[in-house]
Image: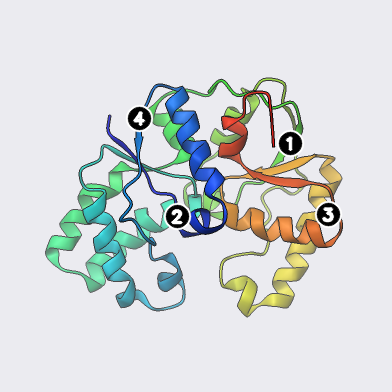
Amino acid sequence: MRIALFITCLNDIMFPGTGRAVVTVLERLGHTVEFPEEQTCCGQMHFNTGYRPEAVPLVARFARIFADYDAVIIPSASCAGMIREGHSLLAERHGSAQLQQEVTEVVPKVHEFTEFLTDVLGVTDVGASFPHRVTYQPTCHSLRGLRLGDRPQRLLRAVKDIDLVDLPAAESCCGFGGTFALKNAETSGAMLADKTQEVLDSGAEILCAADNSCLMHIGGGLSRQGSTVRTMHLAEILAAEGATR
């Protein structure tokens, strides 16, 4: 199987360790991962802010770059959801018949990281060890968009020595929502305050999720409160083998 990593803009610029963690896990399972250096943005920022025709070149670029791969792995439910649903819509409304065909061919190959592990590779135990108390936040895109269900939790439960605790009101939004946090700062801040309190109430040392965007938002709130709770992408926990950062 020829596998490619689509790291996403946020991870590439701010959280490159997540991409490395994805590669570590897949290589541990016996797979080779390629990283096409031509990759750029999935176009979600353009799409969500109304610049939809401007996102079409990004859609075309994605389809071209990843056309020859059997699987495209994305450590972000948000971006995976954009590609699966947004790319088809953009190609249909603003693209050519050729682009529609290219998108139709590449979209089925796109997998969010945890669903690739559980559904495609059929594994939950990836050989990880992480002796810490962890709680999991099911981000809105993973929960309501991709409908990942308990796939992330199944992977976490299989990690050796982990103490996985429930997050109160886990299904509530953290208030990030991309540009929502900028355009509706007061509402976003109130939602964040609720979420950080829920994280603290869980008693966890570490909060993890499948999207670094939400972790960045929640982590910022925790940091401003002087909390020692850390945030980690789920892939980084699955990549751990005893020693942790």
Q: Residue at x 19, y 60 (%)?
A: 100
Mark 4 vs 1, N-terminal side: 4
Cβ atoms under marks 2 and 3 closer than 8 Å: no
Q: Percent position (x, y) of residue 112?
A: 44, 43
User: Distance between the Cα atoms at labels 2 and 3?
Assistant: 29 Å
User: Distance between the Cα atoms at labels 1 and 2?
Assistant: 25 Å
Rendered-image quadrant of the N terminus: top left
User: Distance between the Cα atoms at labels 1 and 3?
Assistant: 15 Å
Q: Percent position (x, y) of residue 103?
A: 23, 55
Q: Mark 4: which amino acid?
A: Thr
Cβ atoms under marks 1 and 3 closer than 8 Å: no
User: Distance between the Cα atoms at labels 4 and 1?
Assistant: 29 Å
Cβ atoms under marks 4 and 1 closer than 8 Å: no
Mark 1 vs 2, N-terminal side: 2
Q: What residue does disc 1 label?
A: 134
Mark 2 vs 3, N-terminal side: 2
